[in-house]
Amino acid sequence: TICPQFFASCLGEGLLGKASDKGLVRIEVENLRDYATDKHQKVDDEPYGGGAGMVMKVDVWAAAIAKARADLPGARVVLLSPQGETLSDAATRWLAQNEHLVLCCGRYEGVDERVAENLVDETLSIGDYVLTGGEPAALVVIDAVARKLPGVIGRAESVETDTFAAGLKYPQYTRPPEYRGWQVPEVLLNGDH
């Protein structure tokens, strides 16, 4: 990422923060600019063939990914891009089986195609829309994968009965039984549901 501070508050709070404190997950953020070789730490350039916007450079990504692979042998390297396969519950379960994941956050008009073709193991998308950067997509993947890890969610059965694991959930209600004239269905109040 070129915006490491983006992750600080999200990863230090809630279930992800608790999981990190317990040592169940370890999340490290690298600044892609640290892998640039010019004095301005440039990570992007104009695309061949013209067009609007800038494209992230292959050489910078190659250096960053090589370092990640050296530091984390066997890591699964994933490029986050709208061109990737759409993230699914099945994909998060599979990703959770990997000891190490490296999430590559695209930005600008995208990443030089040679990164996807030669440097990563797969390309994933979180949906058919464009973000200002891959950092929000990385948070989605981190959250969805981390909750599949043992001990991250307080009750393991919560993961097994998730919306996509057990089929779409039925409507949920809680107390009070009536609010502003809106009623909880009687079948849920009589104890025979």
Image (cartoon, rainbow, N blue to C red):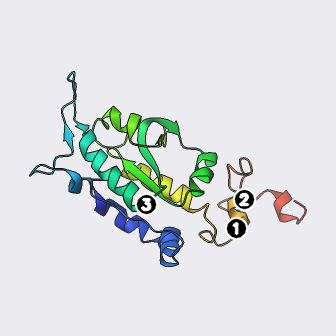
Is tag 1's residue or tag 3's residue first in the polypeptide sequence? 3
Task: Tell me if 2 is positioned left or right of 122 in this view.
Answer: left
What residue lies at 52% left-to-right and 78% top-to-bottom? 22
Marks 1,2: beta carbons within 8 A: yes
Q: Distance between the residues labelled 3 and 2?
A: 29 Å
Question: Looking at this rendering, what residue extends furthest in the bottom direction?
Answer: 22
Q: Name which residue type carries label 2.
A: Glu
Residue 192 in the image, given as x and y percentages of width and height: 91, 62
Amino acid under label 1? Ala
Which residue bears the numbered disc 2? 160
Q: Does residue 74 appear to the left or right of 32 in the view shown? A: right
151 relative to 90, above or below: below
On the image, the x and y values in percent for residue 46 come to: 18, 32
Q: How far apart are marks 1 and 3 (CA)?
A: 28 Å
Of residue 8 and residue 185, the one placed in the foreground of this image is 8
**Residue picked out by circle 3:** 72
Secondary element at tag 1 = helix
Q: From mark 1 to mark 2, how far is it between C-alphas? A: 7 Å
Is 41 situated left or right of 143 in this image? left
Foreground: disc 3 or disc 2: 3
Q: Is mark 3 on a helix, strand or loop?
A: loop
Question: Residue pushed farthest top?
Answer: 49
Residue denoted by label 1: 156
Q: Whole-percent x and y of residue 106?
A: 34, 44
Q: In front: 169, or 93?
A: 93
Decide if residue 153 is in sight here. yes
